[in-house]
């Protein structure tokens, strides 16, 4: 059943919208694919982050104009289909190559990656390259590896130093160096400096005590005249009784 102009225009517009953000595509051809094989192929492409379409060559040429995969969809002949993606082209190539090994009815025509058209052989080479996730993992490992190696070396150096010191202590290799250190510590504390301090403390106590004794003597001397004044009183009383 021939497509009307309206239907053709709708299909072109739909395919153009899908191809608009695509950066990579792999074009293939097939003969007598079963429904089960077609369903399996579409699932494989979806799993790799892409989409799959069976093409009408002239409509594909029109729909791809102005897109990143335009060069791969111009001038196609025969039965054609395309798997396209805006993600990782390596993942798409790996998935299709693995599926084609078990389904020989499908073969590649060409591919395109970031605007560069590639041959069938180059599609196979693309499938053997590491994907973006694998490259990111390797790059992360390379970035972290120097720091990990440095930490390992530093830890090993500390352990080795501790082992050497322990062995030296056990074999008493450090005893000779300890004596000069002990001898050097003795001079800062001479015993002769303590004597003047004691003398300075004791001497003021002796000089302060002497005035106290003198004051006591003066008090005693002052009391003696009172005793002398009391002595004549009995004598006067005796004289009065005698008269």
Image (tube, grey):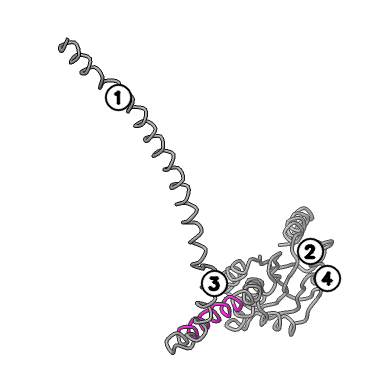
Which badge, 2 or 3, comes first in the chain's sequence?
Answer: 2
Return the mark for residue 187. 3
Say whether marks 1 and 4 touch (CB < 8 Å).
Answer: no
Report crowding for label 2: few under 14, some 14 to 19, many 20 or more residues within 10 A (C-alpha). some
Instruction: Give the magenta-colored segment's residue range.
Output: 149-166
Q: Which mark is residue 153?
A: none
The answer for how far apart the CA atoms under marks 1 and 3 are is 69 Å
- Circles 1, 3 touching at the beta carbon (< 8 Å): no
Q: Provide the secondary structure element on which disc 3 rests.
A: loop
* Nearer mark to the viewer, of 2 and 3: 3
Count the numbered circles shown.
4
Q: What element carries label 2?
A: helix
Q: Earlier in the sequence, mark 1 or mark 2?
A: 2
Tell me, yes or no, whether the two marked residues, 2 and 3, touch with CB atoms within 8 Å: no
Q: Can residue 174 be found in the magenta stretch? A: no
| Residue 148 to residue 237: above or below | below
Q: Nearer the viewer, mark 4 or mark 3?
A: 3
Q: In terms of image quadrants, where is residue 106? A: bottom right
Name above or below for residue 170 compared with residue 40.
below
Q: Distance between the residues labelled 2 and 4?
A: 14 Å
Would you say the residues marked 4 and 3 are in contact, meaning their CB atoms lie under 8 Å apart? no
Foreground residue, 123 or 192?
A: 192
Task: Name the residue carrying label 2.
Answer: 59
Residue ID at (22%, 14%): 236
Tag 1 residue: 228
Q: How crowded is mark 3: few (under 14 residues within 10 Å), some or many (20 or more)?
A: few
């Amino acid at each position: 059943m021939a497509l009307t102009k309206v239907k053709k225009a709708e299909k072109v517009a739909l395919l153009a919208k899908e191809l608009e953000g695509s950066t990579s595509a792999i074009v293939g051809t097939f003969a007598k694919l079963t429904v089960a094989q077609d369903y399996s192929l579409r699932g494989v492409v979806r799993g790799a982050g892409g989409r799959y379409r069976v093409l009408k060559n002239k409509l594909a040429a029109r729909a791809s104009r102005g897109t990143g995969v335009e060069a791969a969809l111009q001038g196609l002949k025969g039965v054609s289909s395309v798997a396209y993606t805006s993600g990782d082209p390596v993942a798409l190539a790996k998935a299709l190559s693995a599926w084609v090994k078990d389904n020989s009815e499908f073969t590649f025509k060409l591919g395109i990656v970031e605007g560069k058209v590639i041959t069938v052989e180059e599609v196979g080479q693309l499938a053997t390259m590491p994907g973006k996730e694998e490259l990111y993992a390797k790059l992360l490992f390379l970035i972290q590896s120097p720091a990990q190696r440095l930490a390992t070396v530093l830890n090993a150096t500390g352990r080795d130093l501790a082992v050497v010191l322990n062995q030296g202590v056990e074999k008493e290799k450090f005893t000779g160096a300890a004596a000069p250190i002990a001898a050097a510590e003795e001079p800062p504390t001479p015993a002769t400096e303590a004597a003047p301090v004691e003398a300075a403390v004791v001497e003021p106590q002796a000089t302060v005590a002497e005035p106290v004794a003198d004051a006591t003597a003066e008090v005693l001397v002052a009391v003696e005249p009172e005793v002398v004044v009391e002595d004549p009183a009995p004598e006067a009383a005796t004289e009065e009784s005698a008269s």
